[in-house]
Every structure is written in C-alpha cells, then in structure tokens.
Image (tube, rainbow, N blue to C red):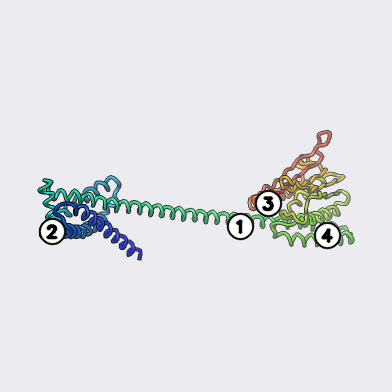
Amino acid sequence: MQMKRKLSAYGWCQVGGWGAYVLLATISYLPLPGFSVWNTLFPMILAGIMGMGITHLMRLLIIKSVLIQLNMARKIISLIVVTVAFSLVFASLSIWIFGVLSLGQELIYLYTHEYKINGLLVLMYSDTFFLGIWNLIYFSYHYVRKSQLQQIERIRLESELKIQQLENEKAHIEYQRNLSNYDLMALRSQMNPHFIFNCLNSIKLYTTQNDTEAATQYLTKFSKLIRLVMENSNKGKVLLSTELDMLRLYIDMEAMRFKEKLHYTITIEKDVEANYIELPPLLIQPYVENAIWHGLMPKEAGGKITIDIAMNNKKSLLIIGITDNGIGRTKSATLKENKSAQHESYGMKITSNRIALINHVYKTGADVQVDDLLDDNAKPSGTNVIIKIPV
C-alpha cells in the first residue's frame, strides 16, 4: 500500500507538472502570428506526453545508477550530464515527430528562419531548463526524504540505546538492592545468635547459683526478648518504641546479672514520636552492649549508662546519645580480654557495616560518632556515642 501511494503521488506530479508545461507553452505561443489551437495545442500535448516518458526514463536511470547515493559534488555533476543528455534526446524526438506528423512547423520555422537559430538548439535549451527544474525538484525531494529517514533512524537508535541503558541501570540498581538486602539479612542472622548467646550466659549464671526467683524473672524477660527479636529480625525497620522495649529488656537482664554494678536511665524528649518513628532493628543495642562489657564491667564499682533520645526538627534527625562513665576506650584497649575484645570488635564492625548498607539502600545519611570523655584531671571518664538517623 505504501508503494502504491508513492507511485500515485509521483504520477500526479508528472501529470500536473507536464500539464502545466503544455498549458503555459500554448498560452505563450497563441498570440503570435500564424499560430492556432490546432498547430500549437496538439504539438504541446504530444510534447507533454513525451516529456512524461523522458522524465520517467530519466528517473529509472537515476535510481538504477544510484546517483542519489553519491556525494554532493558528484551528484551535481551527474545531474548536469543527465539533464543535458536527456534534453538532447527530448529535442531530437520532438523535431522528428513534429516533422513526421507535419505539426508544429510554425514553431520550427519561427526559430530557424525568423530568429535565425537552429531549432534543435532552441528545443534543447528549453528542454534543459524544464528537465533541470524536474531533476532539481526530484533530487531535493529525495534529499529531504533521506535526511528525514536518517533523522528518524538516528532518533530510533538513540531511543533504543537509551532504553537499553535504562534497563541496564534498572537491572544494576535491582541487583545492588537485592545484594544489600541479602547483606542486611546476613548481618542480622549473625547478630541475633550473638545477642542471644549473651542472654543464655546470664541464664546460666542464675542456674548455677540456684536462684530460682531470679532465674524465673530472668527467663520471663528472656522469653519476651526472644519473641521481640524473632518478630523483628526479618524486618527492615521497626518502631522506635519497639526498639526501646527490646533495649530495656536486654539492659534489665544484664543489670540482674551484674547486680549493683549496672544502672541505666532512658530519657525520651516530648517531641520524639516513638510510636511513629522507624529505624533498623537492634541498631542501638551493640553500642549499649559495648559500653556495658568494655566500659563498666572492667570497673570495680560498675557504673551507669544514660540513653537520651531527642529530635533535631530542623534537620529531621533522630539523635540517640549513649553515655557511660566507664574506664574509657584507651584503658579498655590495654586490658588482656582478648576474646571479649575480638568479640566487641566483630560486633561493632557488623553494626558499622549495617549503617553503611542502610545508607546505601535507603539513601540516608545515618552517622555514628564516638567520643572519649575526660574528667577534670584530663583522665578517661567514659565514652559518649551519638547516633544520628534521618527521619
């Protein structure tokens, strides 16, 4: 159907163009002496029919010889040669047919006798003009058409490339997201057994001491803690209130184990909506655990942990401060508790990795800052950890 439409348009252009040629030529010759409709219009109609045949043959030659595909300089030269050659053929055929049919003699006589110009040259001149216009229009059409097709093809290729790039980026992002999710799951699966292991050690202590009431109380807290941990360990985020419930249970159990050596307070400012704010599960606990095991327990009198929860509304940050009055990081590092030290380093490394992955997956700027506290004599007096989580 597309080819038929193209041929139809070409045919109409042929008929319209040569029809206009016949009409204009007839009108221009009729006012001259000795010219009539018969000896002017009929020859012009024959010339128009021959013109359509000549231009159609010229078109076939152009297509077959691939002149359209040449560069601009060679195309112009070829166009001139083809135009002149077909003008000579057109003029020769016109004179021969008019001579055989005894038509258009006034035209030939006018040029050869009145104007003293060779009739063939005159016809070639006029035919070159009309065929040149025809070729110019034909080549211009194909040049514009070729440019349009090239532009369409370029846009299509660019679109396909863009779509392919987007698909590749989407696949890469999806891969990174899945990888990050698996890493988070792996970290949680490593942290939870470690967390539970410490709780079991506390239960073991009460069992060996035959303290039934304390063991029962401890087991009650432990069962609640296990339930909360199991319910939330596979979640990407939990409510702050839930996180604090787990944290209180953990510290209560450690406080029971270490008797009067461990005290704590948790303060939540009024503008902190603990039942709406979400954060990754078990994010605070490793820092509290580190403060207990390596800040307070090596200290003979024990100590206190203060946990402050606040909001920086201007920056939409949840700020969690964990402060202990223990021995400090410097002295803790010198102690020969290799297993605990390795254990602590591993737990803190896991938490650091979790925060980095959380920032990557959720595009957040969570940050942890650890500072050493000094007393009035510039001696270590504890550690302060500040966790900032965008809300």
Given residues 261 and 132, the one toward you in this image is 132
State the image coordinates of residue 326 (x, y, percent, origin top left): 82, 43
Label 2 sits on what residue type? Leu
Tell me the residue at 79%/54% (across/down). Answer: 244
Disc 3, SS: helix
Establish if 368 lies above or below 179: above
**In percent of the image, x 32 and y 51: which residue is there?**
140
Viewed as shown, does residue 9 lie left or right of 316?
left
Could you tell me which residue is drawn at 22 percent across and 57 percent down? 22
Return the disc, 2 or 4, that comes first in the chain's sequence.
Answer: 2
Nearer mark to the viewer, of 2 and 4: 2
Res 210 → quadrant: bottom right
Q: Of label 3 and label 1, which has the lower sequence position?
A: 1
Three-letter code, disc 3: Arg
Q: Which residue is identified by label 4?
A: 221
Q: Crowding at label 2, few (<14), some or many (≥20) Cα neighbours within 10 Å?
A: some
Q: Which mark is residue 61?
A: none
What residue type is disc 4 on? Lys
Question: Reading the chain from its start, which is encountered first: label 2 or label 1?
Answer: 2
Q: Quadrant of the N terminus?
A: bottom left
Would you name the residue on which mark 3 appears? 354
Contact, CB < 8 Å: mark 2 with mark 4?
Answer: no
Q: Which x, y percent locates residue 184?
A: 66, 55
Instruction: Check whether the beta carbons of the residues at disc 3 and disc 4 lie within 8 A of each other.
Output: no
Q: Secondary structure at mark 1?
A: helix
Which residue does the image show at 76% across and 58% down from the upper left? 196
Distance CA(mark 2)–CA(mark 4): 122 Å
- Per the model, the C-alpha gap separating discs 3 and 4 is 27 Å
Real-space CA distance between mark 3 and mark 2, rounded to the nearest whole angstrom = 100 Å
Q: Are marks 1 and 4 in contact (CB under 8 Å)?
A: no
Q: Which mark is residue 178?
A: 1
Q: Which residue is mark 2?
A: 103
